[in-house]
Every structure is written in C-alpha cells, then in structure tokens.
Image: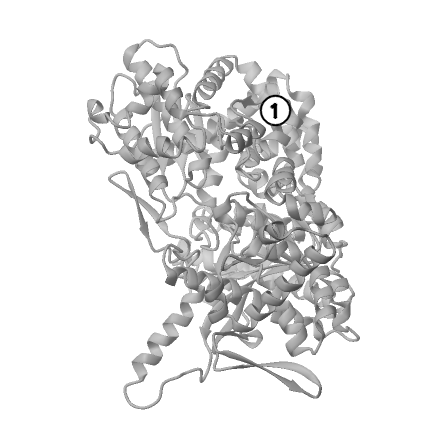
Amino acid sequence: MSMTKEEFKKDFVEKLETKLGRSVEDATAGDCYYALGSLVREYAGRNWLQTTRGYRNHPVRQVYYFSMEFLLGRLMANNLQNLGIYQVCKEALAELGFDLNDVLEQEPDAGLGNGGLGRLAACFLDSLASLQYPGHGCGIRYKYGLFEQRIVDGYQVEMPDYWLKKEYVWEVRRADRAVEVRFGGEVEPRMENGRLVFEHRDYETVLAVPYDVPIIGYRNQTVNTLRLWSAEPAPNNYRFNGAGDYYKILDYNRTLELISGFLYPDDSSEEGRLLRLKQQYFLVSAGLQSILNHYKKRKSAPLADLPKVVALHINDTHPTLIIPELMRILMDEEGMGWDEAWQITTQTVSYTNHTIMSEALEKWPVEMVKKTLPRIWMIIEEINERFCRELFERHRLDLDRIAQMAIVAYDQVRMAHLAIAGSCSVNGVAKLHTEILKQQVMKDFHDIYPWKFNNKTNGITHRRWLLNANPELAALITEAIGSRWIRHPKELLGIIKYASDAGFQDRIREIKRKNKQALARLIRERKGVAVDENSIFDVQIKRIHAYKRQLLNAMHIIDLYLRLKDNPGLDIVPRTFIFGGKAAPAYHFAKQVIKLINTLADVINHDPAVRDKIKVVFMDNYSVTLAERIIPAADVSEQISTASKEASGTGNMKFMMNGALTIGTMDGANIEMAEAVGRDNMFIFGLTSDQVIGYYTHGGYSCQDLYNGDPRIRRVVDQLLHLGDHSWEKSEFHDLYYSLFVSNDEFFVLKDFDAYVEAQELVDLTYRDRKRWMRKVVINIAHSGKFSTDRTIAEYATEIWKLRPYEVN
C-alpha cells in the first residue's frame, strides 16, 4: 500500500485517541503498540475481506494446513514490511516522538509453538500469502505456551508462559463460527430406512470458538487466515443438578478449557496423554467442520467434488485424526457410503513426516481412543481391517509383515501408519530423511505405495530471517544486485561475483561486527557477562535433546578449557560459545545438559586464566525474537546432530543466510547445503548416516573401548565425575556420565568427538585468514536463496496440493 507520512500520522493519532483515549503527549510505548496494531490490522482488513470473498466466489483450490504448532514470533515488523509501510511508519513515529524499536518490543512472542515444526508452519503461511496461493493455517489458541524458561542456580525452572495476559492485537474472535466437538459417550448402531446409522449418545460437548489471525502477503493484496481454536464450555452442557452443583460446574468448565490451555501437556502421566489426545481431536474436528461448512455454502458444490477444491495437509502425526473424522462427517452426517467417503478422504489428505525417532511416531492406547472417541475408534478399526485385508489379499503379504504394518496392533493405534494409509502423499523434509523413510523406517509402506512418497526439503522465509532480522545486510545485497531477490530469493546468487571482492567483504564484516556488538550488549544486560565482540561467536540454539548433541559441544569446551589450563599460552582465536534452547520438563538428561552448560559458564567466565580466551553463555527463554537477535551475530553455526537423526533442520538455513559458517554432520539439510556451497565452505565432520545405521543394525561399536583407548576422551568424560577440582559440585553430572555407557553412547558423542575437535581447530585456523573466511561467508549467503520457503511452498503447491496462484483484486 502507498501512503505519506502525514497520512500515517493522522491515522495513528486518531487511532490513539479513539481506541485508547490517549493523546500523543500521554501515550506510552505500550499504547503506541496497541494503536499501531489496530491500525495495521485495519489497513489489511480490506484485502483480507477481498481475499476471502475471492476464494469463495471463484473455483480456486485451497489448502488448509493443520499443525499443533505455529511459532509466529512477533508479527508487527513483518506486517509493516509486507504492507510496504515500515519506513513510513518509522519516520512518522519518530516525528511524533516515538522510537519504532521501543514500540516493537511491546509485542509478546505468541505462545503457539516450540521448535522447528512450528516455525516451519509459520514460514509456510508467509510464503503461501506472498506467492498468492490460497492457503490457510489451522491450529489451537493455547492460553499458555510451552513454558517460560528461567535459569536458577544453573538449572532450568519452568514458569507459566501466559502470553495472552494482554490483548493480542492480531486476532479477531469469530464467535458466530463456533462449532461443537464431542468426547466420550456411547455409540449405538441401528438400521434406518435400510441403512446402517450410528447414534452418538451421552457425550460431552466442547465449544470450539475460532480466533482468526491475518497472514499478510509481501507487497500484494493477498491476506490469508490462520484460524486458531479456543475450547470453551458449551451452553447447557452440564451433568449436575440441584443445590451445591455450582462449584462442580465451574470445575467442569475448567477441565474443558484445559483442552486449549497448554501447548504439549506433559505426556508422562495418563492424564497428560489423555489431554493431548483430546487436543488433537479438538483441532481436527473443529477445523474440518468449519471447512466443510464453508464448502457447502458454495453454489453447485457437491461433496463428491471436495478433492477438487480442498486440500487438507497434516503437519507431522499430531493431526492424523483428520482422516477418521472426515470419514465420520461424510458417512454419519452426509450419508455417504464407505467407499465413496474413503475415496474422497484419501484424495484430499496429505501428510508430512518430520522424524524417524520412534518416540515421535505417535501411538495411542486402544482403550484410551475407544473410551474418548468411540465413533472415531470404530472407524479406525474398520480402516485397519480393510487395510490389512488389502495387504493379505491383494499384495500377498505374510501375517508377520501385516502385523508390522497394521494401523492397530499390540493394543495401540499407530498414527503414522494411519496417516500413510489415509493420504494421497507422504513427504519427508530433506533428501536424506526421505530416503531413510523409504528405505528404512517406512520401507514396507514404500514397497506397497511408492507413488505416495516424495521429498520436500524444508525452507525458511527469507523476508523475516534476512530482510527483517538483518536489515543492513539486506540493504547491502539490494545495493549490489537490486531488490528482485526479495520476491525471487534464488537471485541471491547474484552476489557470488563479489565473493572475493575486498570492499564487499569489508562491508559484510562491518555489518557482522555491528550485529555482534548489539548481541554483546544484550548478553551483558541479561546475563551480566562481558563478551569480546572480536571473538568467534559460536552458536548452538535449538531444542535441548540427546540427538542434537549439545553434550558434544560442551565436551569440546571442557577439552579446550583443560588445554588452556595446561598451557595458558595456547594460541587460539578467542571464542564465545552461545547456547539457547528449552528442555522438556520431564526430560532429565536434557535438563542436566543445561545445568552442565551453565556450570561451565560459571567456572570458565570467572577463571582469570582463560576468560580472555573463551566465554560460555546460556541465553534463557529461547524464542523467535531472541533468535532474530542472535543469528545475525553468529560466526559459527552448530548443526552437530547424530547423522540420520535430524529430519532437516531450519536453523542451519537461517544461519547460512546471515553469513555464519556451518560446523556439522552430514545430516538433514546439511547435505543439501553442502551440495549447494561445496564442502570446502562448511566444516563437515563425523559419521555418515550409513555408518550410524550400520552400527545400529549390525553392532560393532563399543564406547567403553573408545573411552579406554583414547586418553583425551577419557580425561574429558571423567570431568563429569570429578568436577570438584574446578569448584564444581562433585558428582553433579553422574547421570550424564553413566548415560553414555548404559546406552553404549546411543548418539555417538564419543565416536565423533575427535573428528569434531579437529573440525573446530580448522574453524580456528580458517577464521585467522579473514579474506578466506569472508569468501566462504559470501558464498553461503549467495546460495541460501535455494532454502527459502518460497521454493518449498511452490513445490508443495504444484506437486501435492495442486494449487494455482490467485491474484486478489
């Protein structure tokens, strides 16, 4: 949109006065944020209406992306940029006496996601709208996010993340679009007019109320929708009568509201698992009812044509119940027969698998599903019977193999198997990950349905992670090659001609220096630690998990610290190790790793013998906003997962795009990054996925033998038992020590240790040659456009969802 500063100031002052009853002179930064958010939503509102109307009035196919997470981060800066009024807003606010940066700081990070799964979903929504594809998100409006992480005495402490304590300016409540979702009760089959029907009785009803968030495309008229569902008590849904039941009703209402209360309830208890199952069904039932209600308002739109107009995509296994729920609606409410309903379902649903980790391939106890979702259980049971019969009669599989592939077996419902059987497409998220799915984890299914399997390598939205997060670098790129890269990210390749240009290198280095200065100030403010901006900023920010191997990073730091203690004159480039990430509340190992990192920080940062050489910082409460501060300042990107375990990764792409060099294994999208930039422009180390899988399959690795035979490894590992020599609490990390040996070093931390240390030494040597280092930096940035979600979404749209761009007028 186009507007002058004077027009913006007039609108803004009017919004301050009419919405908040505040004058410019009395307004706080918080007032400005709410007024600005309301104004931006108003600016986008006309296009939002036109987009919705255009999709309704024209036979365009739309995708609905179901995900338990949408890690949006802050939206204000992104929305201003996409509307094309960021600079006008900044200058206008300055003339009114406000700093836009102060205003932007008022926005909370929406507590709607945790890790890469949710951030990918958010990036997808941005690219869908920016490429003018008809596509929407469907999620849950969690009252509380995962948790607010605090570090107390080095330990992670979880606090409630009540991100909705103030008004969320981007959402619009649509109470008139509420639907009911049913749990429990009994299902009675009976014949009616020669047809078998199913009556659901004595069920518990939850009201699903939608809150819509506009998703604004970049400099176009498209505004798609993220619909978030909130669980509320349904009117007259009480099983209590008589005096004294008022408080029972209140307690009952609170239990219903818990369905949208927390992101990822603790599933270590039966109660937590039940709540998570309810959340998943709540999402898919509410979303599907809404979509079908909208579809049926179309003129001449028979349900048999649903696959021509609607694509339903499930992001990992969490929304897999969309398959039996769609079957239920088509059969029980629309009167279809099984075969017709199944054909529509399997043509409409597609599935992305995000993991090969067995614990993440969800399985639900049969009894829990049967009791909580009785009609859904009946449909799942029938799907399983027909699926197993097909495997036996059509594909001539033996009973053992059928048992391995069954959707229901060993008293469990296997959600990944249901997702594959009931969808038209199954995709992995990196070439290696997809091949492992096809040849290992899902091999039996790939043998039967090879046409379903395909790869869609993940991406990131370059508009947020470069244009917004690193504006000076973005401006330099635009100066060098023009602005077409913002809409066509592959054109970032144009800067490759400057890879050896000393002047261009110097300017990028100066931008990096400013970003490091800004991060150093933030670290000092939050952690009280002074870090050297001229040191190498070595960063590992991601969910804390054994396979992501923060422990390997920490062991290298221990090794480096011990070498410096042995030889204070050791010639190294000063290094600042920066960590961030949350551990699941019940994940003891991960929480111990956080304690280890903070203990290292406490000792090393206070040791005058080494503190000018190395520093360690753990940035608590990692979020999208914090990532936007850290990533542009990073020199080294730690992507060191055990080969074969990381499906793709997207943090690796964000760092690459901002000029950090990757030290990593040949895992996930690291492989495709290496193919793009060349291995010489990354620091690759460690076992390959074939070697890892070979050890898992055939054995042959003994971490005890390695420990006994490698003095350096033994010395570092022993520090986990004997840290008292360095003023650490003795025996603090027994559990980490024994975890390596009890599981025979399941994630090959010791096996890869020497190779990792050698790669880190190469990082040190390379960084000393500034021209060589900067050439690698430019090459990485130039090739990062390949990893934009614009590319990813275009592939999904054309190859899976069959979408065409729709230009909103």
Identify the residue under disc 1.
778
Q: Which is more toward the observer, 504 or 523?
A: 523
Determine the image quadrant of residue 709: top left
Quadrant (top left/top right/bottom left/bottom right) for the N terminus: bottom right
Tell me: residue 14, above or below residue 790: below
> Which x, y percent locates residue 440?
61, 39
> Which x, y percent locates residue 206?
48, 74
Q: Residue at x 77, y 75 (%)?
A: 299
- For this orientation, the residue located farthest to the bottom is 242
Quadrant (top left/top right/bottom left/bottom right) for the C terminus: bottom right
Tell me: residue 43, above or below residue 721: below
Q: Which is more toward the observer, 423 or 785?
A: 423
Q: Residue at x 27, y 33 (%)?
A: 734
Q: Which is more toward the observer, 577 or 310?
A: 310
> Which x, y percent locates residue 500?
64, 16
> Which x, y percent locates residue 146?
41, 53
How was this image coloured?
one colour
Q: Which is more toward the observer, 552 or 492?
A: 552
The answer to whether 625 appears left or right of 439 in the picture is left
Tell me: residue 18, above or below residue 90: below
Amino acid at the residue labelled 1: Val
Estimate how packed mark 1 is, as few (under 14), some (14 to 19) or many (20 or more) residues with alpha carbons within 10 Å. many
Which structural element holds mark 1? helix
Q: Residue at x 61, y 71 (%)?
A: 289
